[in-house]
Amino acid sequence: MTAAAYAAIYLIWGSTFLAIGLAVRSIPPLLMMGLRCSAAGALLLAWAAARREPAAPRDWAHAAVAGTLMFAGAYGTLAWAEQEIASGVAALLSATTPFWLVAFEWSGGSRPSVRTMAGLVVGLAGVALLVGGGSSRPLHAAPIAAVLAGTGAWAAGSLYARPPRVPRSLALSAGMSLVVGGAALLLASWGTRELAGFDPRAVSLGSIAALAYLIVFGSLVGFTAYSFLLRVAPPARVATYAYVNPLIAVGLGAALAGERISPGMIAAAFVIAAGVALTLAGQNERARLDRAGGAGKLEGECV
């Protein structure tokens, strides 16, 4: 089950960047993501209700925080940015998730190791390489900043959405966060007047198919697998999807959407992947040392 969950977040989430790019071609970005999250969340909550899994008021309060960060914050900015940048570039920028995790843990008093710091430097150098000329077309500051900020929101929500804050039921915890995030996205779509110039009759079959794929596979399957892994595996190990997804996204974008892959983009991808690998290796090393220290302390107390 754990292997299947990793396969889901590696392969499916790698393909969602292309699906988002296709969906926003004829559906406004915030509306599209709001529909995606709301539909997937409603289906998961229906499944939880059929299994008679209750939710306490405090569960909804925690879901409001996690859902707003992970979906309104991360998904909304990503969909908006993919109107301006290629799906492969968006995926490479989204690979900075582990860097945000380290930054949040550092702010909480957990000082990163030398290897982790080296990974941060290398990874940020890769982002600079991508922004500075690695893309096949000019990149503007606003969509780049939006993706990076959204990635930070996703990391913060991921750290928040862990037991005991969330219900034990995967369907319930994922469904609540998705519904809250979807509602926030739909409200943002209304507030930004996206619907003013939107004609449902102009929506293409490709966008509809991409939205359906995002609902069923990207959210129902992918996010449920992600929620499961956050409970059974260290966050640093779960975050390895961050350097698998971009490779899949770049390949699919080139093969199916005609996105150009420049030599600078390939170089940036390898540098970012190396930075993420160093960062995660440093976090795993620190986790092992912490466990060893805890075991030693326990042994000393027993003696």
Image (tube, rainbow, N blue to C red):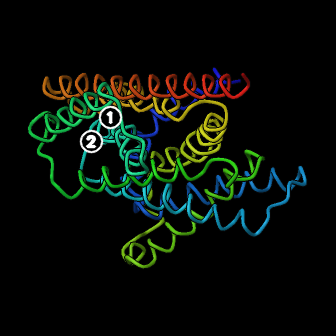
Q: Is residue 199 above or below residue 104?
A: below
Cα separation, mark 2 vs mark 1, equals: 9 Å
Q: Residue at x 15, y 47 (%)?
A: 139
Q: Is residue 11 visible?
A: no
- Which mark is first along the chain, 1 or 2? 2
Q: Is residue 229 left or right of residue 87?
A: right
Q: Is residue 124 visible?
A: yes
Q: Whole-percent x and y of residue 276?
A: 34, 28
Q: Amino acid at mark 1?
A: Ala
Q: Look at the image and tell me in which quarter the C terminus lies.
A: top right
Q: Look at the image and tell me in which quarter the N terminus lies.
A: top right
Q: Residues within 10 Å of mark 2 (few under 14, many from 20)?
A: many
Q: Are marks 2 and 1 in contact (CB under 8 Å)?
A: yes
Q: Residues within 10 Å of mark 1 (few under 14, many from 20)?
A: some
Residue annotated with mark 1: 257
Residue 98 lies in what quarter of the image?
Answer: top left
Q: Is residue 95 above or below residue 284?
A: below
Indicate the secondary structure of the residue bearing disc 2.
loop
Q: Residue at x 56, y 22 (%)?
A: 292
Residue annotated with mark 2: 86
Q: Whole-percent x and y of residue 90?
A: 31, 42
- Which of 69 and 103 lies nearest the eye of the viewer? 103
Q: Whole-percent x and y of residue 69?
A: 48, 59
Q: Residue at x 65, y 68 (%)?
A: 61
Q: Nearer the viewer, mark 2 or mark 1?
A: 2
Q: Is residue 262 left or right of residue 291?
A: left
Q: Amino acid at mark 2?
A: Ala
- Which of 286 and 258 lies nearest the eye of the viewer? 286
Q: Residue at x 15, y 41 (%)?
A: 131
Q: Whole-percent x and y of residue 126?
A: 20, 32
Q: Is residue 201 left or right of residue 251?
A: right
Residue 17 lies in what quarter of the image?
Answer: top left
